[in-house]
Image: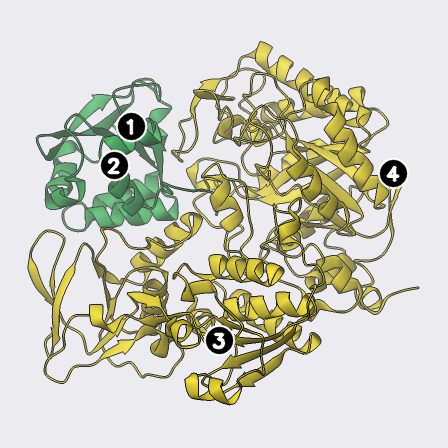
Chain colours: A yellow, B green
């Protein structure tokens, strides 16, 4: 029987024939880079297998297992704990993964990932078509791959594909995303060879064509997918133009590739491709161009396309054939099931924070801001299980920590009421979202999700209610548990003294529109909150100066997003004084001693303090003898921001 | 003759923004080149070398990317080089940074991350817009 969401998203949930396979819908689970959950020598771990079970259960018609490197030398290895597929010794775990995917009705695809320019992570070098130095210091120095090595590498890809099929996978995929070996050969940026593998686009595509041919010969009955750039975003550095990218797609199609997944950007590209600052749907035109160019070749696409409704429309419009999903299913593995049941308001949206990728580039396993259980699927402590004792729980504070805890506890069967002194939920995130230049809808979706879940789970919301000892005494014995999730407050005692009747505004009040801002502005604190306020005000025409005590701005910003704030600071002409010590705020402005020891006065009509903020946990001591169980979570423990607050609250919710 | 500005023009910018490069260890070298020059047989580049707290600009032959004497190399397209040249006498550094951010100049790193940090490059490169501690945008 068709579910209500399936009827609404009829193109997405339509069955599809792909060669000899019938897919239950038009959703392809993307390989999601790699997890870094595995062993340093490439073996798949129980942690990975538990994660794979969740992936297999997402309901996607096609599941692509994460990229495995195909060579025993490790030249193709991009990540410290990437899986390997260069030997039969790795087969048993691949067999388990293929079987798990099949058991859940999915078509199983194994991705082969030779990272080329971004590879050799355990070695002192990487291989690429020509010696082109790195632009990201994380990666290894280049060596030119010889013709013999090219032939060997192609052979290793073919052997890896055959091995994947022996393990039970239905087909394989080779990825050039985002700047891996295949892309390195295709691109003028990294391929400056003068032999038959370089020069003209025909020659640059030779490696790809030989690769397709070798894999096809090794696995003649199994489809091959290629992930190819629709845009490298490297053209200003001498890379391929979009026209050249599509010419390479045409070459791949001519060699009989069974599906093309259209991708965008290289890791080092000077422009954004997948960050929150790119509007959803921005790159859809590249998929549509591929489909128009190659109408007979199935096209998969999903770059910065997180919304199933938009994906459904695109498929209906004939822009592509399969929606390739990665990060949205990291954030909520149940997304597709919720979509099928017309419960999209209950989906935890990917907020594009790039937490996942930031961690990979620190050689850590990836995690997700929005999904605290990601990577912990094997641990029962992270599972939501029915509570042994149903408790009456009061939560004080309706920010992300309070709401995350409330939702988790309610899902376990507890009776939860949230008290919030303001008239809405969201806490500090509301102000942050309202001023975020990247994409306000992403952060607002977090609040919308909690609102929807509160309704669904009958969580009591007492907005406009300040909880203090007096109210607590009135409610004595009404609750078994109190959870203090009151976030942070501005640490006013640490601010410089004011003279001449000057006032320092709380950044949160400004962000929430509770305080008006006039003229020139000085923002005290250049972390993510100060930057967001400064950027928002500057974009509205206020001349802004940020005053920061640390040596650099953006100290608490996600590593992969620091560059974005730096660019905005430059573009919006926001002045900054770093390494600064503030002595006072007078009618003239903010008196500082800058990093070089020079005294300066930063003139400002409005002075806003974004930091320092300290945990607001005063209620904990006051309630110690008033309730059976008393807990504190989120920023009220230690100010760490959205991700840690959500994770902290989830863990507390799981165990209470 | 390349279209790259002469060392004397770069020197004006380096002296004006001396503090920006102040943390670079003596012996650190940054190469600047125009991409269209590098394909030629006898290409030359301008090298900024740190000596006793000051960067000195001088012209040198380009010996390929494997040249181990350089730490960093800035390679610009013709338009970007011309744009920076227009500002060298006054706002050369902001113009260069803007070109790096916009992709007109590519910043190649010829040393490992640890070596660059050791040589005092971290602030310089981050300010240039190089993603020093992460990737994938």
Chain ID, mark 2: B
Q: Do labels 1 and 2 share a chain?
A: yes
Cβ atoms under marks 3 and 2 closer than 8 Å: no
Cβ atoms under marks 1 and 2 closer than 8 Å: no
Disc assigned to residue A19: 4
The answer to whether A442 appears left or right of A43 in the picture is: left
Q: Are marks 4 and 1 on the same chain?
A: no
Q: Which of marks 2 and 4 is in front?
A: 2
Report x, y in % for residue A418: 56, 78
Q: In this view, does A510 lie above or below A168?
A: below
Q: In this view, does A192 lie above or below A279?
A: above
Cβ atoms under marks 4 and 3 closer than 8 Å: no
Chain ID, mark 1: B
CA gap between label 2 and label 4 equals 54 Å
Cβ atoms under marks 4 and 1 closer than 8 Å: no
The answer to whether B127 appears left or right of A393 in the picture is: left
Disc assigned to residue A397: 3
Q: Tell me which numbered mark, 1 or 2, is placed earlier along the sequence.
A: 1
Q: Nearer the viewer, mark 4 or mark 3?
A: 3
Disc assigned to residue B115: 1
CA gap between label 1 and label 3 equals 47 Å
């Amino acid at each position: 029987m068709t579910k209500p969401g399936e009827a609404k998203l009829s193109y997405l949930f339509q069955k599809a024939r792909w060669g000899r396979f019938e897919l239950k819908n038009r959703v392809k689970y993307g390989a999601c880079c790699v997890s870094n959950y595995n062993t340093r020598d490439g073996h798949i771990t129980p942690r990975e297998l538990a994660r794979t079970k969740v992936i297999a259960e997402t309901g996607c018609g096609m599941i692509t297992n994460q990229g495995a490197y195909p060579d025993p030398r490790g030249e193709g290895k991009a990540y410290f704990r990437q899986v390997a597929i260069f030997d039969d010794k790795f087969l048993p775990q691949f067999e388990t993964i293929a079987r798990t995917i099949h058991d859940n009705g999915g078509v199983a695809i194994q991705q082969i990932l030779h990272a080329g320019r971004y590879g050799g992570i355990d070695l002192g070098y990487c291989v690429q078509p020509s010696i082109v130095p790195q632009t990201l210091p994380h990666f290894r120095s280049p060596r030119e791959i010889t013709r013999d090595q090219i032939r060997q590498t192609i052979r290793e890809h073919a052997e890896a594909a055959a091995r994947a099929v022996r393990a039970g996978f239905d087909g394989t995929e080779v990825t050039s995303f985002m700047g891996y070996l295949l892309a390195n050969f295709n691109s003028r940026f990294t391929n400056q060879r003068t032999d038959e593998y370089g020069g003209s686009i025909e020659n640059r595509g030779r490696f790809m064509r030989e690769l397709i041919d070798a894999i096809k010969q090794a696995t003649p009955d199994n489809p091959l997918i290629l992930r190819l750039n629709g845009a490298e975003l490297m053209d200003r550095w001498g890379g391929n133009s979009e026209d050249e990218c599509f010419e390479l797609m045409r070459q791949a199609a001519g060699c009989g590739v069974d599906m093309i997944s259209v991708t965008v950007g290289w890791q080092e590209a000077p422009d954004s491709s997948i960050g929150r600052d790119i509007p959803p749907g921005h790159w859809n035109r590249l998929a549509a161009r591929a489909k128009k160019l190659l109408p007979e070749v199935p096209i998969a696409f999903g770059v910065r396309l997180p919304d199933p409704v938009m994906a459904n429309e695109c498929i209906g419009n004939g822009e592509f054939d399969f929606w390739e999903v990665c990060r949205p299913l990291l954030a909520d593995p149940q997304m597709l099931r919720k979509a099928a049941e017309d419960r999209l308001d209950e989906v935890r949206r990917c907020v594009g924070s790039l937490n996942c990728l930031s961690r990979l580039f620190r050689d850590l396993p990836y995690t997700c801001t929005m999904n605290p259980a990601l990577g912990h699927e094997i641990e029962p402590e992270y599972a939501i299980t029915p509570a042994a004792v149903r408790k009456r729980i009061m939560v004080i504070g309706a920010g992300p920590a309070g709401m995350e805890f409330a939702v988790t506890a309610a899902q376990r069967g507890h009776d939860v009421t949230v008290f919030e002194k303001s008239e809405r939920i969201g806490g500090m995130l509301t102000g942050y979202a309202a001023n975020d230049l990247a994409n306000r809808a992403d952060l607002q979706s977090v609040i919308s999700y909690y609102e929807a879940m509160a309704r669904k789970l009958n969580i009591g919301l007492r907005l406009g209610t300040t909880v203090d000892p007096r109210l607590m005494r009135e409610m004595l014995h009404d609750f078994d548990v109190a959870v203090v999730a009151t976030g942070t407050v501005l640490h006013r005692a640490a601010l410089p003294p004011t003279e001449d009747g000057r006032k320092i505004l709380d950044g949160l009040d400004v962000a929430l529109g509770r305080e008006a801002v006039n003229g020139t502005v000085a923002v005290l604190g250049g972390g993510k909150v100060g930057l967001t306020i400064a950027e928002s005000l500057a974009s509205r025409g206020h001349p802004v100066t940020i005053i920061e005590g640390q040596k650099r701005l953006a100290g608490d910003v996600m590593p992969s997003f620091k560059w974005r704030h730096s660019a905005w600071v430059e573009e919006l002409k926001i002045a900054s004084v770093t390494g600064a010590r503030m002595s006072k705020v007078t009618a003239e402005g903010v008196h500082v001693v800058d990093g070089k020891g020079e005294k300066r006065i930063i003139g400002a009509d409005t002075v806003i303090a974004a930091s320092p903020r300290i945990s607001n946990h005063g209620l904990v001591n006051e309630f110690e003898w008033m309730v059976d169980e008393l807990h504190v979570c989120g920023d009220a423990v230690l100010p760490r921001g959205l991700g840690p607050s959500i994770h902290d609250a989830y863990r507390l919710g799981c165990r209470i | 003759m390349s279209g790259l500005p002469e060392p004397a023009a770069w020197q004006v910018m380096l002296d004006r923004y001396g503090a920006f490069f102040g943390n670079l260890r003596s012996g650190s070298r940054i190469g600047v080149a125009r991409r269209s020059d590098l394909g030629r047989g006898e290409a030359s580049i301008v090298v900024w070398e740190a000596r006793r707290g000051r960067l000195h600009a001088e012209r040198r032959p380009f010996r390929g990317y494997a040249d181990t004497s350089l730490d960093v190399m800035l390679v610009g397209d013709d338009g970007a080089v011309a744009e920076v040249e227009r500002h060298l006498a006054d706002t050369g550094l902001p113009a260069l940074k803007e070109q790096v951010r916009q992709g007109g100049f590519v910043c190649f790193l010829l040393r490992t991350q640890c070596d660059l940090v050791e040589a005092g490059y971290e602030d310089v490169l981050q300010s240039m817009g190089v993603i020093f501690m992460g990737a994938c945008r």
